[in-house]
Amino acid sequence: MKLTLREIATLVNGELVGDPDIVITGISGIKEAKKGDITFLANSKYARLMETTKASAIITSREISNSSKPLLRTDNPSLAFARVVNLVASSYAKHPQGIHRSAIISDKAKLAKDVSVGAYTIIEEGVQIDEGTVIYAGCYIGAHSKIAKKCLIYPHVSIRERIEVGNRVVIHSGAVIGSDGFGFAAVKGVQEKIPQIGTVSIEDDVEIGANVTIDRARFDKTIVGKGTKIDNLVQIAHNVVIGENCIIIAQAGVSGSTTLGKGVVLAGQAGVVGHIHIGDGSVVAAQAGVTKSIPSETKVSGYPARPHDVAKRVNACVQRLPELYKKIRCLEEKVQELEEKLKKENG
């Protein structure tokens, strides 16, 4: 990376305060930055770090006006910095190009001319892969699956049969898309498997983290909506429908046939039971256990999950239990003393 502040200001649509010809050669956090780096400040309460950082320039919000460092003032410093990072990342990335000679591709698969396939990847019959998609080494693409344009599939991803993947989808290593839903019926004490013959549909601009598992539907589709981002180690069960632009953070789990509306956030280790609905824009806090449907624009926490303000009051009471226990023991002893005294007086 080697850009002037003027060029970066154009990239992020920022207001430049300082020397436009300063050359930026790297990016870093505000504490770790060194001369030649550009950094960012998203929260004004950390403004004191602007005077101690060694960065050559800082991307800030428009409310910041004074600094000894050159500034790029923007509406959203985090987003602006992300654009700079993406520029650098694109220069670092070296994706596979062409079809590796060790890849095993069915004669009945259809790959666009500029699709890239890494070593030892297996692509079964009836698969269709569109323009610009890159599949790294050691992946498995099951029969009759469809992967649309400009997707990026990292090493050791398994995409089972009849799966649909939209445009510009990113799937990180170890993810399994379309494994069997967890369906069994007890027959005379023996668990009999219920066939899972549905599929999974991943819509456009979804990103799926490492070691995520998304189960196929029993009959219809498990759906991950457009623009949704899923962190590492998340479990999505069969027949789940996830709306557009949701955020699902690491180690969360969604049970079968539950639906999430648009813009839902599930924080880390949140758990959601099956056959319920979480409304648009709702937030489920970390480690919350959701046992019933949640209205739109609601924040819940705790187990069982309650509206966050209620959960905070409940937690405050729980924290006082040791003190309350001591008081109750003390009161019990006093009551016992009074009862014994009354017995003696009444002879």
Image (spheres, rainbow, N blue to C red):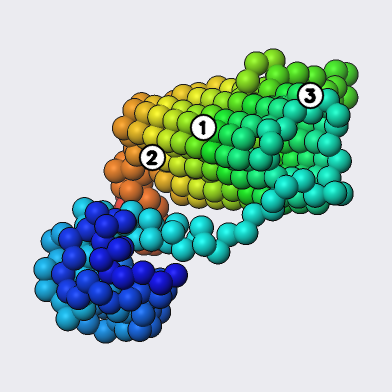
| Amino acid at circle 1 | Asp
CA distance for labels 2 and 3 = 40 Å
Q: Position of residue 281 (x, y in %)?
A: 35, 33
Q: Which residue is mark 1?
A: 204
10 Å crowding of disc 3: few (<14), some (14-19), many (20+):
some
Contact between marks 1 and 2 (CB within 8 A): the answer is no
10 Å crowding of disc 2: few (<14), some (14-19), many (20+):
many
| Residue 126 marker | 3
Pick whichever of labels 3 and 1 is earlier in the sequence: 3
Q: Is residue 68 left or right of residue 271?
A: left
Pick whichever of labels 1 and 2 is earlier in the sequence: 1
Q: Is residue 147 left or right of residue 59?
A: right
| Amino acid at circle 2 | Val
Quick one: SS at disc 2? strand
Quick one: SS at disc 1? loop
> Of discs 3 and 1, which sits in the foreground?
3
Residue nearest the observer in this picture, 187 or 109: 109
Residue 184 sits in which quadrant? top right
Instruction: Judge whether 64 appears above or below 171 on screen.
Output: below
| Residue 283 marker | 2
Q: Is residue 192 left or right of residue 264?
A: right
CA distance for labels 1 and 2 = 23 Å
Pick whichever of labels 2 and 3 is earlier in the sequence: 3
CA distance for labels 3 and 1 = 21 Å
